[in-house]
Amino acid sequence: MIRLMTYGGTAAEDAAVTRTGGVPLVPEGFTWPRCSACGGALQFLAQVRMDDLGGPDGRGLLAVFMCDNDRGNCAAWAPRSGGNRALLLPAEGASPAQVPPSGRTRLGEVCAVRYADVDAADYYDASTRWAKARDRPLGDVLGRLGGEPSWLQGDETPTCARCGRRTAFVAQWEEGHDHRTAAYFGGGGCGYGFACEPCREALFLWQA
C-alpha cells in the first residue's frame, strides 16, 4: 500500500498540518536558515507532521528549506551543501516563524495535503491509478509519505552524521500542482526528506 500526498486545496499559511508552502511552525528562538553559498534566506518548502507516519505521538515536525535566490548555483540539490536545510522541530508550543524581509523565502501557494492509500506496485503506478480513478490531473499528486523513496537517479539515502546509520525516509515531493507557484527541483524532479529521529537529524535532497 502506498500513501500518496494529494492536493487538497489551499490551506492557512500557519496551519499545524502537513502542507507545502506557507510559514513554518517553530519553537521560540528559531533563526531562519540561510544559504551557505549566497548568504540569502532559504525558501520554506514544506512541513510534515511526523505523527502522520504512525507510531508514538509527539514526534514533531519536519520542516524543509531550500535556496531559490540564485537558482542552479547554490548546490541546493545536495543534502549537506548548505543550499538546503531540513529540521526536526518540536510541535508543542510552536508558532509561526518570523519571515525574513528579503529573499525568495516562500512558495507562491499554500497547499493542503490529503492522504490517499493506493494498492499499487510502485509510486508511479499508484499516482496514475489515483488520478484516473478520480478524474484528477496527475499533477494533483504532491508526493508520498513514508514507505520507500522512488528514486529518479539511483539510491542516495543519506547517513546520519552523528550515529552513522542510514536515515529513515519521511516523504517525497513533486514540484507542485501549478508550475506558477511550485518549488524547483531541476524542472520536473522530486525532493526527498529523511530523518534520524533518535539523533534529531534531518536531511533533504532532490533529483531530476
Image (cartoon, rainbow, N blue to C red):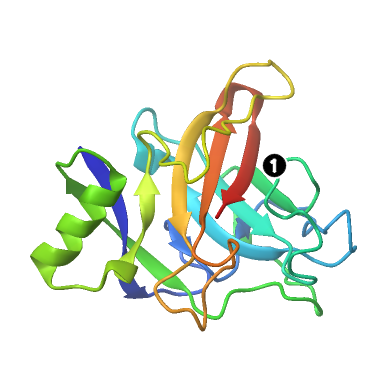
Amino acid at pointer 1:
Pro
Count residues near mark 1 (Cα–Cα under 10 Å), then give few for <14, some for 14-19, many for 20+: many
Residue 48 visible to the viewer: yes
Q: Quadrant of the N terminus?
A: top left
Q: Is residue 136 left or right of residue 166?
A: left
Q: Is residue 191 left or right of residue 100?
A: left
Front one among 17 and 6: 6
Place residue 164 in its image quadrant. Answer: top right
**Above or below — where is 35 with respect to 184?**
above
**Above or below — where is 69 with respect to 194?**
below
Residue shown at the point (43%, 56%) measured from the top left: 18
In this view, which residue lies farthest toward the left? 133
Task: Indicate the position of residue 203 as horizontal and vertical percent values.
Answer: 64, 39
**Above or below — where is 27 with respect to 7?**
above
Q: Is residue 65 left or right of residue 17?
A: right
Residue with the mark numbered 1? 79
Secondary element at tag 1: loop
Residue shown at the point (56%, 31%) measured from the top left: 157
Front one among 164 and 123: 123
Residue shown at the point (13%, 65%) measured from the top left: 132
Residue shown at the point (35%, 34%) measured from the top left: 147
Circle count = 1
Residue 92 visible to the viewer: no
Place residue 135 in its image quadrant. Answer: bottom left
Task: Indicate the position of residue 144 as horizontal and vertical percent values.
Answer: 36, 49
Task: Indicate the position of residue 7 as horizontal and vertical percent values.
Answer: 32, 68
In this view, which residue lies farthest toward the bottom? 180
Q: Is residue 105 left or right of residue 35?
A: left
